[in-house]
Image (spheres, rainbow, N blue to C red):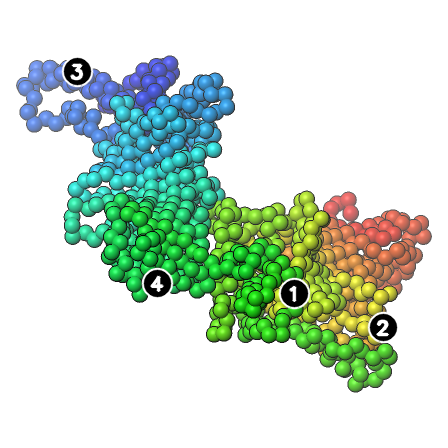
Amino acid sequence: MSDPLETPPSHPLQTDQQKLEDFLRDLYRKNYSVRHAHFEVCRIIKIETNTIQLEEARMAERLESTRRLKREGPPSDTDESAPDAKKACSSESVHRRIPEEIDFYDPEKEYKDVEDEQVDINFVKEFFQKEAEKEFLELNRKYGDRKIEQLEDVLKLFHLRRLTPKCCASAEKYVLPIKSLKWITGDSNIKIQITDYQNNTVEIKYWPGEDCSLAEYGIGNPPVTVDTVEFNQLAAADFVFILKGPNLRLQLMEFDIEPFDKLPTFECFIENFLNQELRKQQVHVAKLAYKFSSSAPDITYRTIQQYLAPKVLTYLKFSVWKDPDESVESPRIDYSDFVEFVQWKQATHLEIQETNLGLDWQHFYHFEVISLESLDPEDVENMCQTFKEARYQPTKGITINVERKLDFEGIKSKLEGIGNIDDSEKSIEFLSGDKKMIVKFEDFYIMLKMDWKTLPSGQTYGDFIENLFNERVPFREAHRRLLQEIDNSLQGQSSTSSQRSGMKRPMDASEEPKPSKTVRQEQPEAPIPEEPPGNLNERQRFVQRWKRERVEYYPGIYDPQNELPEKTDHIIQIEQVRDYYEELAQAMMDGYPRDQNAFGFGSKRDVWDLLFFRMISPRCCASAEKFAIKSITRLKIVIFLDKVEIKIQDDDRKMLIEYRRNERGKEEVKKRRIGEEQIIEYDTPSYKILAACDFYFLLRMPLLKLERLGIKMYDMPTPTLPRRHRRYVDISLLRIIIRLIAEKKPSPLRVEEKLTYMFTREFLVLNEDPIQVDPLINMLECGYLKTIKLRVWDDSEVYLANNYPNMTHFLANSRFSIDYLRPFFIWKNTETLNLRGCFIFTPNDNFEWKFVYFFQKIIVYELSADDVWDAQQNLQLEENEHQRYTVICDEEEELIPDEIGRTRGARRIPGNFDKHTSLGFPLKHTRRDRNGMTYVLKMGKNEINVTVRPTTDSD
């Protein structure tokens, strides 16, 4: 007799789909998850089918016992053959099948069904998906614009988002009516309080259950069981789900800890979900309240702060959880960890409820209002001393409110050595560099403001400097002009700050020392004599003169000078002006939106400012380097005989930045755009160094994706340039760009359409080493570039002028060798190689087709009959690269069919023409080799096509 337990009877939930759907619908309404509902169905089936089998087994046993009783007597009490009902219903028999690793925010994408399960889990998933779609339709009918108005409907979304990835994506599209959001860490539980704009509040509570997590969505509602995540992970995921809501505008976001006996040891996981889910999104929060504790007080706050939208966040409120154990030291905040974030710098109001969290005044200078529990005289002394010596001062003024009355007498005794105290006004004044600081005391607040010294015009020093900053006058020139204004005021002379950039220095004004790391370029010497050089010595002097105009790389060439020399006879030190420039520049850069990597996002219009800011200080340079101008599509540098141009283009407009030395000997940088022009003048370094460093700055810009990148030299202006002045364009700045790329190793740059690069043959004439372009080529991302365009600068007029020694010897019959171009041939997926131009190598001049076989399209200046057959022989298939090649001749002179035929005969090239060459183009020649490959050569007047394919029977 077979064991009845091996073939259990079918359960109604397995045989009747309607009953199964009704059962699942009931679980859906109880907010079960897909996996939990599947587990519950299987559990019921297992329990009930095991009970039926047990009854059948017992009846069979009774029948067998009756038979044995008749034969053998009563059965033994130790008989253990009957199944144990408790064992059949135990947790081991209905254990949950939960995957070991689950994404704690996103629902599972796929469910793997297990063979012995009573119901397919994917059926449960599909059923829940259909029920969810009905609920979404109901919400959409109720809120056509997806702007939910009632909090009870917000609570529905938490269940919906956990069902399937599709449901999660749909739930995230609803606009939530949430004004404030509060996270409360409790004793073995977490609460989230949600308040709408009508001040209605709902609370969600999370706590651990037995082998599961429990959540109560709304006080009084039945708890929901979630068995795939811990309760703290579930709370963090729900919290971040709210933050991901579109157009969320929170007036308050608060993180609180309830008072209880011992600090909780469980993690909140908020920072994990923020980093995983928000990514580039920034949450609009006007006020952030955060309670610190002794367990890692800064980590979660730092993460939360960086995901809040700058400028929107204006109010910060800090408090501390009071540990009942007095032996536990109260946490102190390291504010230096916060100041790197723009959100901190843009906030205007700081509230610290417990001063034992620490007061770091040097990082509070930008706040307009600070609210504290109390300030003792030592705190006030520390504040005044810090602001007196700090690099950055509260130029806008600060109001400090306190809850406990200030001890003015105690404060006065502490401040006697700092400045002048006025008892009647309850104030103190002292100097901080070039500014006067005034601190006024009342019973429950302190008003602190900076009073800049003023010029005869009524302008403060700060306003004077800020105006020059807004005009983009370099800080060295701004310092010189300020000293001149001060000197004029001392002499009773009146002047204005509206002098043009580059104004001549008065004879009695001291000159600022130049940066030690920069090299001042010499001014051009006297004009060359009227007659062109007639002998070798004169030609060598010609070369030496223009070599002196070259610029060279040196360590620190790109980096702004950090330490500036101090001159005791200056009322205002240059470092003070530089620091104020830095403060103004940082404030402007802090105002841009940023992503999760702290990259600022600007437009092409902002490039001009960023190039100016990066020259101010190392800190400004580092900040400017974190900006991504994603709208730039084309970037080109063009080198002239007497200037350099950087051309920047986006989808709409072009911007030109021109670098040159003007008639006053200043290094001039000019921005040109339609209807707009702006000039900056520097004393040092050379305009060529400025152009090289600025171009590198743009190349290394994060997230930059260009359609085209170009490096070229402008044609020589032959009609306007006398023959005795004709020379090679100075490309020494390219060596600086290449060296910066090699030394600093910036992130890869993507160029998707075309790279243009122009060489010169000057190094051949002067017998020098060529520029090694490998660092530039290696910087570009492989897999995207479609066209490489290579040119050689037209030096025919330089050749005719014969101003260089041995020029005829070097250039009479040679073109640019392919050896110098090989670094460009690393992209084997680039489609087109464009060598159009008469001064670059030709196929018959040191050209080897085997080096360019991986380009599908090759454009050359000339193409002879020999080139045609060389191309067919050497454009060979290697490892299934390209099978079709097109070679286009740019020269107007056409190929000659008969010449192609004669050359083939002379070189004894095997194969056959489809028709005789005397019949003209098009021609087709087919050749088979021993390796089973067929080469098909099609020829036209200015174009040939080479196809390499396996030989077929038709061949």
- In percent of the image, x 82 and y 64: which residue is there? 717
Tag 2 and tag 3, C-beta contact below 8 Å? no
User: The disc labelled 4 sits on which kind of residue?
Assistant: Gly
Tell me which amino acid carries mark 3.
Met
- How many angstroms separate mark 3 from mark 1 (CA)? 111 Å
- Tag 4, which secondary structure? loop
Q: Earlier in the sequence, mark 1 or mark 4?
A: 4
Q: Which dot marks residue 419?
A: 4
Q: CA distance from mark 4 to mark 2?
A: 71 Å
Residue drawn at point x = 57 percent, y = 74 percent: 510
Of circles 3 and 4, the one toward us is: 4
The mark nearer the N terminus, 3 or 1, is 3
Tell me which label, 2 or 1, sits earlier in the chain. Answer: 1
Per the image, label 2 sits on a secondary structure element best described as: helix
Residue 210 in the image: state x and y as whole percent: 22, 33
Specify which label sits upstream in the sequence, 3 or 4. 3
The three-letter amino acid code for the residue at tag 2 is Arg
Q: Amino acid at mark 1?
A: Gly
Residue where numbered disc 1 is placed: 502
Camera-side residue of 50 and 517: 517
Helix, strand or loop for disc 3: helix
In front: mark 2 or mark 1?
1
Number of marks in the rendered image: 4
Callout 1 environment at 10 Å: few (<14), some (14 to 19), or many (20+)? some
Give how far apart the Cα atoms at labels 3 and 4 are.
104 Å
